[in-house]
Image (tube, coloured by chain):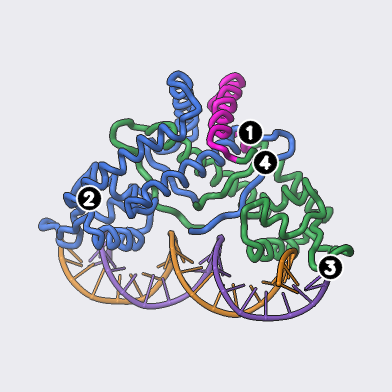
Chain colours: A blue, B green, C purple, D orange
Amino acid sequence: MGGTVALVTTSRNHRGGAAFLLAQLGAHAANRFAERIGELGLSPSDIGLLRMIGTDPGLSQRALADHLGVVPSRVTALVDQLDRQGLVERRRSTEDRRNYELHLTEEGGRVLGRMRSLGAAHEDDICAALDAEQRARLIELLGLIVEQQGLTAGVHPGYRS
Amino acid sequence: MGGTVALVTTSRNHRGGAAFLLAQLGAHAANRFAERIGELGLSPSDIGLLRMIGTDPGLSQRALADHLGVVPSRVTALVDQLDRQGLVERRRSTEDRRNYELHLTEEGGRVLGRMRSLGAAHEDDICAALDAEQRARLIELLGLIVEQQGLTAGVHPGYRS
DNA sequence: TATTGTTATACTCTATAACTATA
DNA sequence: TATAGTTATAGAGTATAACAATA
């Protein structure tokens, strides 16, 4: 559980511009969600794996590494962990015995479901200040930026360059 | 320069809700800014220190640690670095010789100025998809969330819990 | 030879605790 | 005894490179 040195805005605005607010709120949202899923015994790194395996069962560790932009050795360690927790299962492929086919266990499926519930609660928590119209407007504006900045829809690079 | 495992949204929305978009864009904005200031020889951790010392010259390392929510030993290391770079100067306090008074050097002031210019360019980059009215609207909505979530104006906790 | 996955290693970041000096 | 700051140490997270099995 590390802390990180805080950043501070310029002196001109008392709250900073949009870029600063995005960084501040993005960190806050990510930290709060990490807390929530921590209660499920999961770390932020596990989220992407679990979701991708749930969405695309049978995919290989290599495919996972490529999709997530992570090095294969890292996937080994993360899958090891989820395997030990009984959430993910490695099945040696019969077609090409070099690679595994990754599947959620029953328990893994349940945990993924709980993770999604937590995600919905999290969304409500973060947006508590906004009414439905404001929420939609915010999502619209953020979507414009995501698109223009060329970010992959639905994937984010984590919190290091 | 690490990477971090990506997260992925739920399958319901192709882009995720506001909380996910905030985390995604926040990480993106922070990473892009880190790249920019990297060209100045600074790391993200240096930003807050430099800004605070520029805003409140003469403050102690202890005060800095408190404001930024960081442990004193960490401030020692960070100030060491900025000191070696010739950006910050430690002056032993004459009133209480246990503590230092931190000041920017001339070069430190220049670097802080350049950092602010980069911040403005960064703001324009991140908001390139939006016109002036949309930008204002976004800042307004984000401000509402910041306030309701009880975040300190102008400070963010970095990217670890 | 090329590819999947693993292991061994090293590096970065950060916190904790013990320590020095000043008060 | 209490406080400012430093040093030494340890742990988490992640990348790189060498390696084994399979193709």
- Element carrying mark 2: helix
- Residue B137 magenta-highlighted: yes
- Residue A88 magenta-highlighted: no
- Element carrying mark 4: loop
Using a 10 Å C-alpha cutoff, classify the residue at mark 1 as few (fewer than 14 neighbours), some (14 to 19) or many (20 or more): many
Depth check: give the residue in front, A74 or A111.
A111
Q: Which residue is mark 3?
A: B97
Same subunit, labels 2 and 4: the answer reads yes
Depth check: give the residue in front, B124 or B64.
B64
Q: Which residue is mark 4?
A: A9
Q: Which residue is mark 2?
A: A108
Q: CA distance from mark 2 to mark 4?
A: 42 Å
Q: Is residue B129 left or right of residue B64?
A: left
Q: Chain of mark 2?
A: A
Q: What's the mark number on residue A17?
A: 1
Q: Is residue A91 left or right of residue A132?
A: left
Quadrant for residue B119, please give it. top right
Q: Are marks 4 and 1 in contact (CB under 8 Å)?
A: yes
Q: Amino acid at mark 4?
A: Thr
Q: Earlier in the sequence, mark 2 or mark 1?
A: 1
Q: Earlier in the sequence, mark 4 or mark 1?
A: 4
Q: In the image, what residue occupies the spot 35% across and 42% down? A: B8
Q: In the image, what residue occupies the spot 45% across and 31% down? A: A147
Q: Amino acid at mark 3?
A: Arg
Q: Amino acid at mark 1?
A: Gly
Using a 10 Å C-alpha cutoff, classify the residue at mark 3 as few (fewer than 14 neighbours), some (14 to 19) or many (20 or more): few
Q: Chain of mark 1?
A: A
Q: Nearer the viewer, mark 2 or mark 1?
A: 2
Q: Where does the magenta region start and end?
A: B122-151
